[in-house]
Amino acid sequence: MSKNSPVASVKNVVEKMYKENEETRKHKLIVDFFAVYAYYSYAYLQNSNTITKGHYMAQPFNILVVDDEDALRNVLSSELQGEGYSVVSAADGDEAITILQQKSFDLVLLDIKMPRVDGFEVLRFIKEKYPQTKVIMLTGFADLKNAIESKKLGAEDFVSKPYDLVDLLTTIERVLSTE
């Protein structure tokens, strides 16, 4: 650990806070704890691409939001952009396939029930042409049959509408963090 590293800086601050009590073993352990905590936090920041709102995001993940409900699609896209993601949206499966052929995405949030081309057809297309792209299926018709079908076709996860935004963001971060 170099003297100029963020970890060393944190350790120096903590040591200064407890300088008058440094001779006690208890305070030395606190300093060591914060140094270890800072080291692992710094390592996480260096190796992670998604960090929660308000923090650094080295390269934002590219997410495609596909939903035929305009209001839901727009709100979700806006929230994800606020979290630091690069977001493109599509109003239906046809538009999603066209966009996927023009740009690569790390993750697709995909509604199941849409006119013309449904989410399962788009999921098949994604997994055949772009198997590295992760997919989370979204549906207002939460049932075991849809969840099983989604997993069989290669979706990484399945979220029922209406969803809790915090839960969805947690699912997105988990899916994006897996190899």
Image (spheres, rainbow, N blue to C red):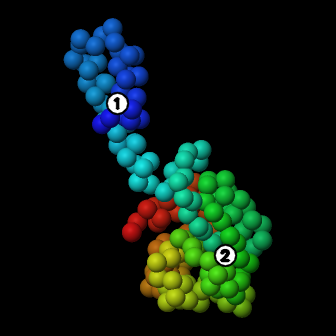
Q: Is residue 178 left or right of residue 159?
A: left
Which image quadrant is residue 152 in?
bottom left
Asked if the residue under mark 1 is in contact with the one under mark 2, i.e. CB atoms within 8 Å, the reply is no
Identity of the residue furthest to the top in this view:
20
Q: Is residue 157 left or right of residue 118?
A: left
Instruction: Give the image location of residue 138, x and y in percent.
Output: 60, 73
Instruction: Give the image location of residue 128, x and y in percent.
Output: 49, 89
Marks 2 and 1 sit apart, C-alpha to C-alpha, by: 48 Å
* Res 82 visible: yes
State the residue position of label 2.
66
Which residue appears at 75% of the width and 73% of the height?
69
Instruction: Give the image location of residue 175, x and y in percent.
Output: 46, 66
Give the answer, above or below, for where 76 lies relative to 39. Answer: below
Comparing 77 with 147, the one in front is 77
Give the answer, above or below, for where 127 lies relative to 34. Answer: below
Give the answer, above or below, for where 47 lies relative to 29. Answer: below
Secondary-structure class at tag 1: loop
Q: Is residue 5 left or right of residue 167?
A: left
Which residue appears at 62% of the width and 77% of the height?
103
What type is the residue that disc 2 sits on? Val
Identity of the residue furthest to the right in this view:
70
Instruction: Give the image location of residue 111, x and y in percent.
Output: 63, 77
What type is the residue that disc 1 sits on? Lys
Number of the front mark, 2 or 1: 1
Which image quadrant is residue 166 in?
bottom right
Q: Label 2: few (<14), some or many (≥20) within 10 Å?
A: many
Q: Is residue 72 left or right of residue 11?
A: right
Q: Which of pointers 2 and 1 lies earlier in the amino acid sequence?
A: 1
Secondary-structure class at tag 2: strand
Q: Looking at the rendering, in which quadrant would you find the C terminus? A: bottom left
State the residue position of label 1.
3
